[in-house]
Amino acid sequence: MNSNKNTANSLIPAGPKLKENCQIPVNPAVLATRYATDLIIDVSGKEPQIRRGKNNEFYIPLGEKEFLKTVPVLSEKGFVLISLFCVQNFEDSPGFTLFYVFRLNGFSGIFAFMRNARKETTSIATVFPSACWYEREIRDGFGIEFTDAFDKRRLFLHEAYPEGFHPLLKSFKNGKIQAVQNPKETYHFKQMEGEGVYQIPVGPVHAGIIEPGHFRFSVIGEPILNLEIRLFYKHRGIEKLAEGKKPSACVPIAEAISGDETVANAVAFCTAVEKIAGIEVPPRASYLRAILLELERIYSHMGDLSGMITDIGFPRMTTPFIILRENLFRQNELLTGSRFMRGAIDLGGVKKEISGEALSKLAFYLKTFVSQFESAITAVHASSSLIDRFSTTGVLKKKLITPLNLTGPIARAAGASYDVRLDHPYGIYKDEPPKRMTKTAGDVLSRFEVKAAEVLNSASLIQKLIISVPDGPTVAEVTGFAISNIPDGYALSMVEAARGQNLHWVYVRGGVIDRYKVRTASFCNWQAIEHAVLGNIVPDFPLINKSLNLSYAGTDL
Amino acid sequence: MVNPLTYVFRSKVTEKFKFSDTELEALGSELKAEVNQVFGHSLAIRELDSGSDNSTEIEISNLGNPHYDVERFGISFVASPRHADVLLVTGAVTLNMAEAVLKTYEAMPSPKFVIAAGDDACDGGIYKGSYAVLGGVDKILPVDMKIPGNPPSPKEILRGIFALVKKASG
């Protein structure tokens, strides 16, 4: 992090330098605009036309020359590429607009650099390695060639899709397509060669009750020399599915992105739409949303904790976690009518009121939960064989966090402190910040401990919220338009899901969704597994995989 | 020679079961009787995700929780389709998974049965009309039983399995 070495330094009030994640005491919007303006002037000599978005994001259109000059500087300054997506016919600009979305430590705002593109453009993946998947995604979706990209393989369109088919083009109307029968094309995995090197192909269909994906291990003896993953078997066309629909009809689509991130994605989607329309979510609804978000985090983490112990074959130790998790699913159902809290979140607030009585019951249950959870954790800590398997296994190096935009508990277990709830606060988290949880070793044990601590933090946060939840309406009252008729505009929103930073960008035009871009934490975090397994033995792969808890559905969309 | 009475009077070494659910127990014992009769005491299920949102998988794995513990009823989830009587499919069938779904089904020995679990597996659900899915599982495999739900709860899945076993016996 060297953001304090640039020209905008003078704008930062006297006192502490821009340390990682510090709060900026002056108007952050002014600061972010000035910072970006100075940076672009510094690089290109031209003043950019910065537009302030509706949710503390800043849109910075750049000419091709300025863009190319700016990219390496962004890397130097420590900007983190958090998304890259394409929009066709954005506002009144025909053709394609690429949005390069960045965050920078110390700023709660998000910087979106806009670049116009034709059918061919250039790659930034040599500067920002995480751009690789995004560029392949854009190539598949829109047919834009990144001519100098080092990896031009298809990403989410596998061999069954005909060449030249690009589903996100406006010219393609969603519907059945003719799949390629017996495709000749095969996917090229990186070849590892040398004496004693052999490959283990695994998937897409795995041995357990889990989602599909392909892992190609190159192994010498037992240690893993290289791992290459191939995903997107579950590509269901979520983004295209939303196009042309009214925002109010798309909440269930957001919920279907990843089953165990139902609330997180519904809240992120609704927040983006609410920001576009200027809808203020009433305080009670904000509290209820946060309670459900934290409940989702707890049950999700419980699955990981039990899964990690299952994967070292220790059922006696797993069972208390599994029992608690099932109890949580039942709490979810009592609270919202759905074990996955489906249909609980809606535009403007929450769909159904949750009574004070139901909340008190939850608070009461959480007391029992916490004491049972603590005793389960104590048992784990007392097991030397378990600690032996967890410790130093699957180490995720801190230096990967920024280049790959790794977020969530897996990054916090490797020395990062980033948490969307604290660094880009939304909803109730502005007033009720959760505790920051960090470990440094980056191994399976650290991930276990960070998740265990987050379970307790979330439980105490829920208890705190239940005490202070205000009375009042649970859905916003809007004037001037119906909630089913959202005015045109666009906004970006982010939430801290159980797995990390989920990003949604919604563009409403003519009352319907013109473009819906989703990027879940798993999309970025999956790329960490190829690094975390190196040098580990193949039998530890399931454990490492579980400790990273990556969603296939949330990545494949 | 073992005295059969010792099985009845010996004390259990497991902890006492605190969450008994009479409805589940009734369903389970009926299911067990059917499985004994129709599948020779054990029903082997291979789960296959053809493009779900992962919630149905979670509910299927929850069947192994102490709350349900369906192995008691003669049901086991197996790793290989070669060992399976039933293919329990979740999710709409995506274009990217179609080939793997067919191969998995073909790898199963006959007689074999297919259950579609979840709204999306039943008829495409929310993904209906998307370029990326073929539709429900019946677009590609002969489906014997459909279990609707978004997602179906563990008990609903168990009821669906029971319905299939009854249907299989004719």
Image (spheres, grey):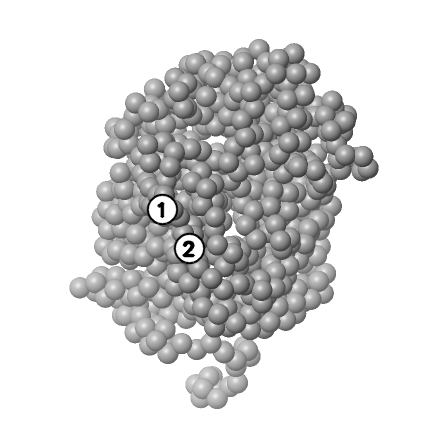
Q: Earlier in the sequence, mark 2 or mark 1?
A: 2
Q: What residue type is labelled 2?
A: Val
Query: Type of residue at label 1?
Result: Ile
Q: Residue A475 carries which label?
A: 2
Could you tell me which residue is drawn at 65 percent across and 69 percent down?
A: A375
Question: Going by the image, does A220 lie left or right of A261?
Answer: right
Quadrant in which residue B92 is drawn = top left
Camera-nearest residue between A407 and A304: A407
Mark 2–mark 1 CB contact (< 8 Å): yes
Residue at the outermost right position: A15
Q: Residue at x 50, y 78 (%)?
A: B18
Quadrant location, the C terminus of chain A: top left
Seen at 40% across and 48% down, the residue is: A478
Task: Give the CA separation, mark 2 to mark 1.
Answer: 10 Å
- Give coordinates of residue A260: x percent, y percent: 47, 52
Q: In which quarter of the image is residue A417?
A: top right
Say whether residue A162 is visible: no
**Which quadrant does the N terminus of chain A fall into?**
top right
Question: Residue B122 at x, y = what percent?
Answer: 27, 50
Residue A180: mark: none
Total numbered labels placed on residues in the image: 2
Q: Is mark 1 on a helix, strand or loop?
A: loop
Above-or-below relation of A217 to A88: below
Q: Which residue is drawn at 73% across and 29% down?
A: A11
Q: Which of A183 and B55 is in front in this view?
A: B55
- Res A483 label: 1
A363 sits left or right of A332 in the view: right
Tell me the SS state at disc 2.
Answer: loop
Q: In this view, does A69 lie to the left or right of A168?
A: right
Residue B120, how many percent across, how many down? 31, 48
- Marked residue chain, label 2: A
